Image (spheres, helix red, strand yellow):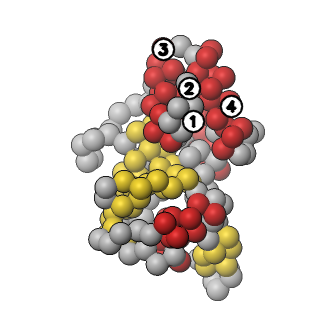
């Protein structure tokens, strides 16, 4: 799901197991466009996890700490990778650390990148489905364990899988395959 003010990648499926995997552990990458410079302190706070208010019925006013995020600076602002999927989480995390968000765009869900043209769609191929399932509930929980699993899959994978893994790793873990 995306809120109405957010653009980007959506995966539409009638496969309940795949839907649960996507909701419960697949890394989602967002580009946060801002109109002012994001400080290193703000980035460090996002990387450590921040306290945000719960918004579900019956829990209003309660708060929770988000899981640590992968954050990197880009010309437009920052990119954030989350495995958690709380309602409007990126927006609430940015607000909690004082970042004024201008636009939010989901770049990818796992290794599945958003099409360049707004409103376009395509079917996922077998390699992309396999990559999505790697991050399922039974998958490793920490970044280092995921990195080990992806490197192992890269060594065993076919050409298409290797390309997908190389793109994802080179973006988030430069030099991981060296």
Residue that label 1 marks: 132
The residues bearing labels 3 and 4 have C-alpha atoms spaced at a distance of 19 Å
Report, in whole angstroms, how far the alpha carbon at label 1 lies from the one at label 2: 20 Å
Q: Which residue is mark 2?
A: 177
Please report the residue visible at 65 percent of the width from the left and 50 percent of the height from the top: 24
Cα gap from disc 3 to disc 1, whole angstroms: 17 Å
Indicate which disc, 3 or 2, sits on the residue closer to the N terminus.
3
What residue do we see at 46% from left, 23% from top?
163
Residue annotated with mark 3: 159
- Marks 4 and 2 sit apart, C-alpha to C-alpha, by 10 Å
Q: Quadrant of the C terminus?
A: top right
Q: Residue 31, image x and y in percent?
A: 39, 55
Q: Which residue corresponds to the image point at 50% horizontal and 70% vertical from the top-left?
A: 42
- Asked whether disc 4 touches disc 1, contact meaning CB atoms under 8 Å apart, the reply is no
Of the two numbered discs 3 and 4 on the same chain, state the one appearing first in sequence. Answer: 4
114 to the left or right of 85:
left
Which-is-in-front pick, marks 4 and 1?
A: 4
Q: Nearer the viewer, residue 38 or 32?
A: 38
Question: In this rendering, which labeled residue sits more in front, label 1 or label 2?
Answer: 2
Above or below: residue 167 compared with residue 162: below
Task: Name the secondary structure under disc 2.
Answer: loop
Point 35% across, 69% down: residue: 37
């Amino acid at each position: 799901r995306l809120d109405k003010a957010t653009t980007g990648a959506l995966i539409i499926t009638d496969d309940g197991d795949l839907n649960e995997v996507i909701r419960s552990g697949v890394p989602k990458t967002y580009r946060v466009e801002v109109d002012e410079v994001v400080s290193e302190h703000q980035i460090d706070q996002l990387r450590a996890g921040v306290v945000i208010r719960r918004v579900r019925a019956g829990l209003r006013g309660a708060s929770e700490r988000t899981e640590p995020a992968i954050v990197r600076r880009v010309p437009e602002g920052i990119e954030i990778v989350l495995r958690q999927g709380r309602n409007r989480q990126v927006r609430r995390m940015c607000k909690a650390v004082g970042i004024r968000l201008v636009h939010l765009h989901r770049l990818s869900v796992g290794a599945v990148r958003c099409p360049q043209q707004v409103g376009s769609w395509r079917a996922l191929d077998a390699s992309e489905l396999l990559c999505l399932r790697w991050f399922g509930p039974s998958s490793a929980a920490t970044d280092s364990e995921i990195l080990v699993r992806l490197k192992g899959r890269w060594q065993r994978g076919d050409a298409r899988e290797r390309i997908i893994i190389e793109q994802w790793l080179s973006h988030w873990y430069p030099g991981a395959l060296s």
